[in-house]
Image (tube, rainbow, N blue to C red):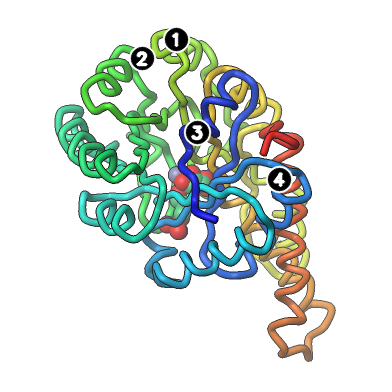
Amino acid sequence: MPLVSSGEMFKKAYGKYAVGAFNVNNMEIIQGIVDAAKEEQAPLILQVSAGARKYAKHIYLIKLIEAAMEDTGLSICLHLDHGEDFEICKACVDGGFTSVMIDGSKFPFEENIALTAKVVEYAHAHGVSVEGELGRLAGVEDAVKVNAKDATYTDPDQAVEFVKRTKVDSLAIAIGTSHGAYKFKGEAQLDFERLKKIAGLLPEFPLVLHGASTVLPEFVAKCNEYGGKLSDAKGVPEEMLKQAGTMGVCKINIDTDLRLAMTASIREHFAKNPSDFDPRQYLKPAREAVKNMVKHKLRSVLNCSNQA
Ligand code: G3H
Ligand code: 13P
Ligand code: ZN
């Protein structure tokens, strides 16, 4: 069963719900996510960052995801997350991905357009879809470091020009989300007026939200209860993300909430079983924690259960 592209998924989702794009970098995370998507019969995008690709190696990730499709019968889109240059996008197109992101958001507008258009030309010639990004998110990630003060929201008129000139298939916009676990001090608010304007100017065009983890307080608390030292942070309220899914946002990226669920489970395991040293003993409940978190997101945030 071949990997699928995101085009059909987005067409079906537009205006009704969003497809979850979950970051993967090892077998347990992949298994937890696909088992949840299977039980929920949900459409699914698995995405790989440059860091994940370096950590696990391209070939291992491809083979693991092929195994996941064979095992579950699910159609999966495999996407490059935050491709930072033409070369990594090309490597992923050539290496079997069905979707790539070229993140030129750190460049001036014209440079972002030129780079994105170059990736689109290559990817489209190979049947692969492309996500671009315009506007800047705040946050701390391995490869995505933007000072909160520099964060600027997406300009609606620029978004129209960007899509027209680059011919991207989807666009990540900045309307108040941020990457990582250390988000804004207060609760993040989405700029729905801006979203409405962008979606109105780009009818039926799939929009993407990055940095869409909510940093659920119970998981931060659980990490800290078992020896963690995470500071309090609040992500985007889940209700707001659900609403965005009815307003033209077709893809919602979630990584941090899965990391927190997995880490909380492993911390709890070792606190309660300090003499364990068999990785299966702590990775099995960790995988289950990922699965439960993804099921929750598919049902309550993405609203995409039974849409596979
Ligand atoms: O937005 C980025 C993703 O959360 C991936 O993070 O670069 O640490 O793999 P990473
Ligand atoms: P979070 O850090 O909020 O989970 O965002 C993940 C993301 O945007 C991946 O590209
Ligand atoms: Zn992102």
Q: What is the distance, in whole Å, between disc 3 and disc 2 at their CAs?
A: 15 Å
- The answer to whether the residue labelled 3 contacts the one labelled 2, judged by CB atoms less than 8 Å apart, is no
The N terminus appears in which quarter of the rendering? bottom right
Where does label 2 land, which residue?
156
Rendering coords of residue 37 (x, y %): 70, 49
**What residue is shown at x 36% (from left), y 55% (from top)?**
143
**What residue is shown at x 23% (from left), y 28% (from top)?**
166
Looking at numbered disc 3 in the image, what kind of residue is underneath it?
Answer: Leu
Comes first in the chain, label 4 or label 2 = 2
Name the mark on residue 209.
3
- The answer to whether the residue labelled 2 contacts the one labelled 1, judged by CB atoms less than 8 Å apart, is yes
Question: Which structural element holds mark 3?
Answer: strand
Looking at numbered disc 1 in the image, what kind of residue is underneath it?
Answer: Lys
Query: Ligand 2 within 8 A of label 3's CB?
Result: yes
Q: Is residue 182 visible?
A: no
Q: What is the distance, in whole Å, between disc 1 and disc 3 at their CAs?
A: 15 Å
Residue at far right of view: 272
> Which label lies toward us, 3 or 4?
3
